[in-house]
Image (spheres, rainbow, N blue to C red):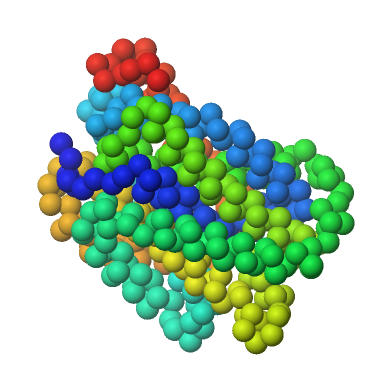
Amino acid sequence: MRIDKGQISGTQFMFSVACFIQASAPLTTFISAVTLQDSWLVLLFGAVLCLPLIWLYRTLMVMFPEQNLLQILVEVYGPVVGKVIGVAYIWFFFTLASLNLTDLGKFTKLTIMQETPNVVLVLMCVLVSALAVRNGIKLVTKYSTLFTIITFILLSIGTILMLNQIKLENFMPMFDQPVGKYVQGIHIISTIPFGELVVFLMIHPYVKLSRRDATKYLFLGFGLGVITILVILLLNIGVLGNLLGMFTLPTLVTLRLVNLGMALSRMEILFAVILVMLLFFKITLLYYVSVLATAQLFKVKAYRQLALAAGALLIAYGLTLYPSLVEQAASAQEIVPFLWTPFEILIPLLTFFIAKLRKLPNAKEA
């Protein structure tokens, strides 16, 4: 039984996937600090290696078209084990939402509203997000197309204006890092943000997708997101070179170098605004999925009643996670990829194999 009666189009689903990945643009520093000038290669390798993972998500969507992730877990593992794993996923969704909410507050305070307390910024975001969450999936994903297009336009303009400052020697030498660094970088990019697309297994029942559409829209959205992150990394490496690892937000530093008169001298402000928009979208989607999963697990039919309480929990939880961006970056490089791997790779893969072995009634040949 669906708690939310809303429905979205395949196009909205595609742009939501793209927008979700684009929102992780500030997190490119997680891999650029590890693999430096080869970060763009690590991104490409990571994206290629994640294609089977995206196919796995697509296959689960096709096998269980009317069931979201928590319902799939109960179907495959039984009511007891399935709900235990479901509780773990709720923690995963809440943690992702809280981390991104914290990122939004710190990023906004650092770039746009330096005098505003961080708590006020995250509270404003939660209040607006709660409105979307209470109105369902249609409103949550409504502006994904607009945000994605604006991001591509602004990034294209920035790329054109920065071409004269890109130095090809900044990409050299290639493959000069220890093998362990490349493995670490690929693991990071595979789990943050690509593996986070597992959250879309919570909303796919609200999309009318045939097998062909599921493949097309999911992979197109993934491709658009990858292109965005790749262009940002290429710009940062080409302009900053060896200085890349010194900055917490290298993209803002890169765009700050654009200076074609007063009208185009502060492009980083525009980029900061669009990043706030993208982060707001990602937070709202994760917030919605967290509330939906909680309501479903505890059989609360009116999930809207949980929105504000869940928002307060997100703020409180977020304040306890990391005191600074530096500590968060260190955790993302060394700890978080290992924590996320079971939720994004191991459990979905095990679920697929068990579903096939049990020959469940809803399973179809993908």
Is residue 203 positioned above or below 153 on the image? above
Q: Is residue 148 left or right of residue 359?
A: right
Q: Is residue 78 above or below residue 340?
A: above
Image quarter (top left, top right, bottom left or bottom right) of the C terminus: top left
The foreground one among 239 and 36 is 239
Query: Where, quadrant-wise, is the N terminus in this rendering?
Result: top left
- Please provide percent x and percent y for residue 108: 49, 74
Up-down relation of residue 242 to residue 273 (above or below): above
Q: Quadrant of residue 338?
A: top right
Asked if one can make out residue 111 in the rendered structure from this viewpoint, the answer is yes
Looking at the image, which residue is at 52% across and 55% down? Answer: 22
Left or right of 316: which side holds 261? right
Q: Residue at x 79, y 68 (%)?
A: 165
The percent position of residue 151, horizontal first and vertical second, equals 52, 62
- The one nearer the camera, 145 or 226, is 145
User: Residue 28, percent across and down?
Assistant: 62, 56
Residue drawn at x 77%, y 38% is 179
